[in-house]
Image (cartoon, rainbow, N blue to C red):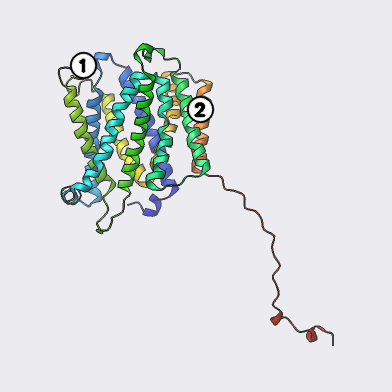
Amino acid sequence: MLSSQFLASPQFKLILLVGMVLQNSATVLVGRYTRSSVPASELYVVNHLILITELGKLLLSCVFEHFTTGGKFMESIQANIIDAPYDALKILVPALLYLVQNSLLYVALSNLTAPIFQVTYQAKLVTTAVVSVMMLNRKYSFQQWVCLVTLSIGVAIVVLGETGDKKKDEVPSGEQSLTTGLFAVTVACCSSALAGVYFEKVVKAGPGAQKKKPVSVWMRNIQLAFFTIVTASMKDLFSGSPTSSSSESQPYFHGFTTWVWILVGLQAGGGLLVAAVIKYADNVLKGLATGVSVCFATGVSTVLFGTPLSSQFSLGALLILVSVYFFSNPIKPKEKSTPQQTPVQDVSRSPSNDQLLPK
């Protein structure tokens, strides 16, 4: 077992940051490959992927909870869900907020071009920090606020450089509403920040006045995955209506190739990693990892897919890396050197004048 001192150390947070970067980058690259390497008729349904992924998170969280409780998994279910239903219902709030976020993102993508959407959605880094200050009383220095804004700008520059030539992804301007798209992005950013920070507050909450053992992060992840499965199933039920599109009415596991199952594993494992980051670090670290992963994934894409690197990418990557470094390593102000004062001699203990005179 890892000691609590190591779990609270900067070294462990760095390990979590590196893990988040690798997981996010791998998810982006594999996800892009699964959507571009097969014809449209063989594509999987996104909502089916979300549902299978949440089932994977649920099973993995159950395994971790079983081992952390010493084989007392059913006792933990009894104590934290059956005997405390109102406490478990707390997790329904972030589950619904994530549903609102995902729904509004599709609205935003339908009304904004890809570059404008990517740029405006980076505001979630700043909104997460603001919500953390409001809900968790977290304090950030002026340097850290500047780093957050600079990192958002850097990610925007990288994304603009990557999507600037993809005119085919844009919807004709006559079918777009800029006001609707910007409103959807704004609400999605707020929903993402509220869901993440609220989940962090619940996970890090103390035992309270009842002197009850704190609920583990794995049990909270079980509750979150369960409510997400319920909301995704309801959405899938409505999508299966006769008015839905043919792609949404495909049977389960349609288009699930080996790479899609790898994507499911990455996202399921990533969900547990996010829970660990929220438990032992915070949501802002998760946002920093997401920003770095955009830069890292684009660099790897250059090697694997031959994507050319532009000067915009280099500038944005530099801003991202510098922002992450100075956010984690604040500049210490120089201490002013004070002149040393000569100690005042105690007159009462000083030799008398008679002793100083020569004899």
* Amino acid type of the residue tagged 1 in the rendering: Ser
Q: Amino acid at mark 2?
A: Gly
The numbered disc on residue 104 is: none
- Residue plotted at (31% across, 50% down): 205
The correct choice, above or below, for 176 with respect to 136 in the image is: above
Where residue 303 sits in the image (x, y, percent)? 44, 22
SS label for mark 2: helix
Q: Look at 33% across and 44% down and name the residue there.
A: 200
Q: Label 1 belongs to which residue?
A: 245
Q: Which mark is residue 316?
A: 2
- Quadrant where the C terminus is found in the figure: bottom right
Q: At which x and y percent is residue 321?
A: 50, 34
Viewer can see residue 284: no
Q: Report the label total.
A: 2
In which quarter of the view is residue 196 placed? top left
Q: How far across and down, in percent of the image, does residue 263 sit?
A: 29, 28
Which is more foreground, mark 2 or mark 1? 1
Where is 284 relative to 6, above or below?
above
Label 1: state its secondary structure. Answer: loop
Quadrant assignment, res 211 = bottom left
Q: Position of residue 91 (x, y in %)?
A: 25, 42
In the image, what residue occupies the spot 43% across and 50% down? Answer: 9
One can see residue 305 in this view: yes
Dot 2 or dot 1: first in sequence order is: 1
Does the residue at mark 2 contact the one at mark 1 (Cβ under 8 Å)? no
